[in-house]
Amino acid sequence: MKAIIIEDEKLSADHLALLLRKIDPSIEIIATADSVKRSLELFSKGIMADILFIDVHLADGLSFEIFSKLNIEIPVIFTTAFDEYAIQAFKLNSIDYLLKPIGIDDLKTALTKYQKLKSVYQTTIIEDITNAYQNLNKQYKNRFMVKSGDTIASIKTEEIAHFISEDSLVILVTTSGKKYSVDYTLDDLETLIAPDLFFRINRKVIIHINTIQKANSYFNSRLKLNSASLSDDDCIVSRERVSDFKKWLDK
């Protein structure tokens, strides 16, 4: 088996190579690189291998940049120092990974597992894990610029009680009760604000978790929230969102 190692820490690269040779002395490390730039140069020359071990974070950027610029069809195993939440993204997208510091048993398991995945289209796997990583590391807005008359103010997200759609406008309502029109739709806001802090409870309202006092069962399998900033009609969690809402509260 021929292998390529992309790793910006020499000690980690040497350690991985040593473990590979212990598992299978016939494994040959045919090339190494320590950056996105050098990796692109390497693969541009047409080098091929049976397997590629690649660190997510390289000296000059994320290794996903390599796959976005070149069509690399070599089976991939990522190495990472990510925390448990990021690891879940790897697992959910059916891609193998090795958590640093790499142990020989983990490496054996990864190699065995990957033999079963070789027939999976690599482009699909790389795209899935790239999207998962980007979503995981997305930078959400932590403030909104709003206008009141001739005055422009900055409202921090922790000061927001909820967003509500009224008469074709989206209104930002603060915890102190102030209201400001914002130039976003609720659909836009769902992609811009942190999903662990905000939840869209119905078609009109996105609420901040800190403004929810309690939730009670309501007729037609819905929930009714106790929130000082919302009217009785607007604080209902729609039936189709109840399950996701409960999971959100339980995170």
Image (cartoon, grey):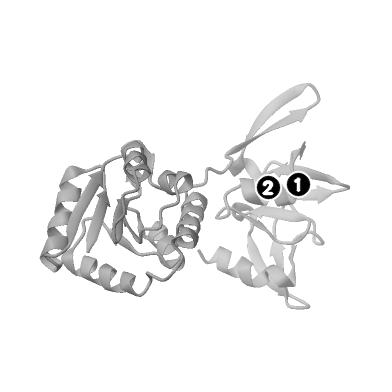
Q: In the rendered image, which quarter contains the N terminus?
A: bottom left
Q: Secondary structure beneath disc 1?
A: loop
- The amino acid sitting under disc 1 is Thr
The answer to whether residue 64 is left or right of residue 141 is: left
Quarter occupied by residue 231: bottom right
Residue 235 % position (x, y): 75, 61
Determine whether label 2 and label 1 are within 8 Å by CB: yes
Q: At 80% from the left edge and 61% from the top edge, which residue is drawn?
A: 232
Q: Secondary structure beneath disc 2?
A: helix
Q: Is residue 55 above or below residue 233?
A: above
Residue 137 % position (x, y): 47, 48
Q: Is residue 237 above or below residue 70?
A: below
Q: At 65% from the left edge and 44% from the top edge, which residue is drawn?
A: 160
The answer to whether residue 6 is left or right of residue 134 is: left
The answer to whether residue 166 is left or right of residue 236 is: right
Q: Nearer the viewer, residue 162 or 59?
A: 59
How much space separates mark 2 and mark 1, taking CA atoms? 6 Å
Q: Residue furthest top?
A: 150
The answer to whether residue 89 is left or right of residue 32 is: right
Mark 1, Cα crowd under 10 Å, few <14 / some 14-19 / many 20+, is some
Quarter occupied by residue 116: bottom left
Mark 2, Cα crowd under 10 Å, few <14 / some 14-19 / many 20+, is some
User: Does residue 234 appear in the picture of this structure?
Assistant: yes
Q: At 14% from the left edge and 68% from the top edge, which residue is drawn?
A: 23
Q: Residue furthest bottom?
A: 220
- The amino acid sitting under disc 2 is Leu
Tag of residue 241: none
Q: At 27% from the left edge and 73% from the top edge, which residue is drawn?
A: 112
Residue holding disc 1:
185
Tag of residue 189: 2
Q: Is residue 215 above or below residue 137?
A: below
Q: Nearer the viewer, residue 110 or 249?
A: 110
